[in-house]
């Protein structure tokens, strides 16, 4: 069952990465919302997310990443990429990364929503 759910999650991400918008060289926000598989320890999940840092930074295209969770358990992974092409390339490569497997295995595939949008304003 977990293999089927992981496959569905991977298909959702791959579909979103392949089909959103036209290629751009402007900075792009990637926003993914999801819930964890019931019983997942949030601290373990955050540690798994942090373990993906070397891969994400190694793409040379990640500008910034934040991971948050609201009081209903809805998580948001927000990554700023240098371009839409870079975001799509990273999403395609992620499934080949061993460090991504624990992170993805804790995410419930039902209700995963991934979208990309060109950044119009950024303030620090």
Image (tube, rainbow, N blue to C red):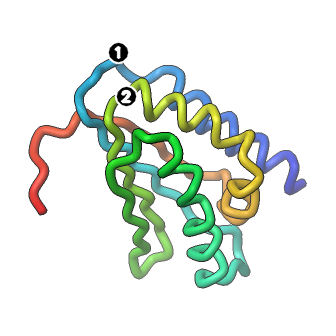
Residue 45 place in picture, x, y as percent: 63, 74
Q: Residue at x 67, y 62 (%)?
A: 103
Residue 100 place in picture, x, y as percent: 68, 54
Q: Is residue 112 above or below residue 20?
A: below
The secondary element bearing badge 2 is classed as: helix
User: 67 or 52, which lies in front?
Assistant: 52
Estimate how packed mark 1 is, as few (under 14), some (14 to 19) or many (20 or more) residues with alpha carbons within 10 Å: few
Dot 1 corresponds to which residue? 22
Report if the CB atoms under discs 1 and 2 are less than 8 Å apart: yes
Residue 13 place in picture, x, y as percent: 59, 38
Which quadrant holds residue 76?
A: bottom left
User: 60 or 74, which lies in front?
Assistant: 60
The secondary element bearing badge 1 is classed as: loop
If the image is split into quadrants, where does the N terminus sit?
Answer: bottom right
Residue 106 place in picture, x, y as percent: 70, 65
Q: Residue at x 40, y 71 (%)?
A: 68
Q: Is residue 76 above or below residue 7?
A: below
86 sits left or right of 102 in the view: left
Dot 2 corresponds to which residue? 84
Q: Residue at x 78, y 50 (%)?
A: 5
Q: Residue at x 61, y 76 (%)?
A: 47
111 sits left or right of 124 in the view: right
Q: Earlier in the sequence, mark 1 or mark 2?
A: 1
């Amino acid at each position: 069952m977990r293999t089927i759910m992981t496959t569905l999650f991977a298909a959702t991400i791959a579909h979103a990465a392949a089909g959103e918008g036209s290629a751009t060289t402007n900075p792009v926000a990637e926003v993914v919302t999801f819930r964890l598989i019931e019983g997942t320890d949030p601290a373990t999940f955050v540690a798994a997310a942090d373990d993906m840092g070397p891969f994400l930074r190694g793409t040379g295209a990640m500008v910034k990443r934040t991971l948050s969770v609201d009081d209903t358990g809805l998580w948001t992974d927000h990554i700023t990429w240098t371009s839409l092409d870079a975001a799509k390339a990273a999403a395609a490569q992620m499934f080949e990364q061993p460090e991504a497997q624990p992170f993805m295995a804790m995410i419930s595939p039902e209700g995963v929503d991934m979208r990309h949008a060109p950044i119009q304003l950024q303030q620090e």
